[in-house]
Amino acid sequence: MERRLSAASRRSAPSRIQQLSHLAQRVGAVNLAEGFPDFPAPPHVKAAAAAAIAADHNQYRHVQGICDILAETAKRDHGLDADPLTDFVICCGQSEAFAAAIFASTIIDPGDEVLLFDPAYETYETCIELARGVPVYVPLDPPSWTLNQDEFLKSFTSRTKAVVLNSPHNPTGKVFSKEELLIIAQACQKMDCFAITDEVYEYITYDENKHISLASLPGMQERTIITSSLSKTYSVTGWRIGWACAPASIASAIRNIHVKLTDSAPAPFQEAALIALTSTPDFYSSLKKDYEVRRDFILLLLKDFGFHISFKPQGSVFVFAELPSSCQISDIDFVTNLINGAGVAAVPGRGFFHRNCDGESYHHRYVRFAFCKSDDTLMAAALRMRKLADTKGKTCLTGSGKQEDQTVSASH
């Protein structure tokens, strides 16, 4: 009983992201910690939501047209043949879609193991443990966060039931290559495992990198559950419109979980999704270009500040930067000093690494910065960081000089 209470307490405790966001709010820091945009959502999408509310689309609702559009998009972009009537479930964001996929009785039984690539977003582990599954972490190799085929394959056991894949990846910004996806696909088929994908950043890729859905590879559609959402692409993280795409029997189980948890996704925002999901190609190309400019801006800022940028994000809205070589303190202490000294918030990297990987020293050497922010926000962060560096020196943050230690607990 005591062990169960301890586990429940750990799951319900505020995350490091939340703790440092609260600290950032208290000191009025510029928030580069959380991955939500602080600039306006597209006008045509907001107008559609307002019109839906005015038209009284405000009760429990399932908007089948979303599934129809998603099926067309999956066919066009990935060559998938998905039935819009049976293979899609509209959920309250990607988070609920992922949780419902894990909780569906057809996927995880107590004691079953689920492979995740480390570093990883913390929600995955919580869902697996709540389903009484066992998370098993496969470390990606820095600095480019490449898939280590040997490590991956030896992580499978007779209890392995699923592999979780997030690409483009949070926190590193990695886009898994087709070669890496083929390794994952072949292993899933050989070991008769499901794959559960998080593809919320599918339209946010840079340079020549392209998102490939794991389900599009031979033999994978029938064993892959795709989860995604409106949140990141259309800058509406608070609307909570997401979906799962899966074989009909699995989708039915996910739908049952969804109905029992939340009844339906927000009705007016489902109506607005019809407009968002039919945005013109120009919208998506502008999205990439705008984010690429933001990425390059934050990379230059961090390089000027002494960060070691050995991996340029290929997708998503994050830079996972290695602390300057002169930095003598941990990621948590650095971020806390950054908040208190410069008034800029970021996320310590160790929160994305997990139990069976804690022995590696580099786990305390990374900080995640979100660049899904307005030009004004990014410029304010740059001015604050440069002002601090000019007046007190960078060592006031890194602990590499003799300045007074400003470190405080991240939970304060």
Image (cartoon, helix red, strand yellow):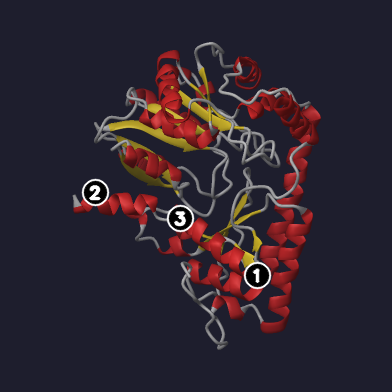
Task: Name the N-terminal-most of marks 1 and 3.
Answer: 3
Question: Does the CB distance between marks 3 and 2 fall below 8 Å?
Answer: no
The disc, 3 or 2, on the residue closer to the chain's N-terminal end is: 2
Which label's residue is closer to the chain start, 2 or 1? 2
Q: Which residue is mark 3?
A: 15
Query: Which residue extends farthest left?
Result: 1
Q: Amino acid at mark 1?
A: Gly
The reply to whether discs 1 and 3 touch (Cβ–Cβ < 8 Å) is: no
Judge depth for marks 2 and 1 and give the one in front. 2
Q: Residue at x 41, y 26 (%)?
A: 260
Q: Residue at x 70, y 50 (%)?
A: 38
- Above or below, 347 relative to 397: above
Spot occupied by residue 362 in the image (x, y as percentages of width and height): 45, 62
Name which quarter of the figure residue 378 lies in.
Answer: bottom right
Q: CA distance from mark 3 to mark 2?
A: 19 Å
Image position of 173 with respect to 23: above or below = above
Q: Amino acid at mark 3?
A: Ser
Q: Position of residue 213 (x, y in %)?
A: 55, 28
**Vertical position of residue 306 compared to residue 371: above or below:** below
Give the amino acid type for the residue marked by disc 2 in the picture.
Answer: Arg
In this figure, which residue is indicated by the disc labeled 2?
4
What is the secondary structure assignment of the residue under circle 2?
helix
Residue bearing the label numbered 1: 343
In the picture, measured across the screen, residue 74 lies left or right of residue 147, that is right
Image x and y of residue 189, in percent: 38, 23
Q: Quadrant of residue 90?
A: top right
Query: How far is disc 2 from disc 1 in space, using C-alphas?
Result: 39 Å
Residue 172, label in figure: none
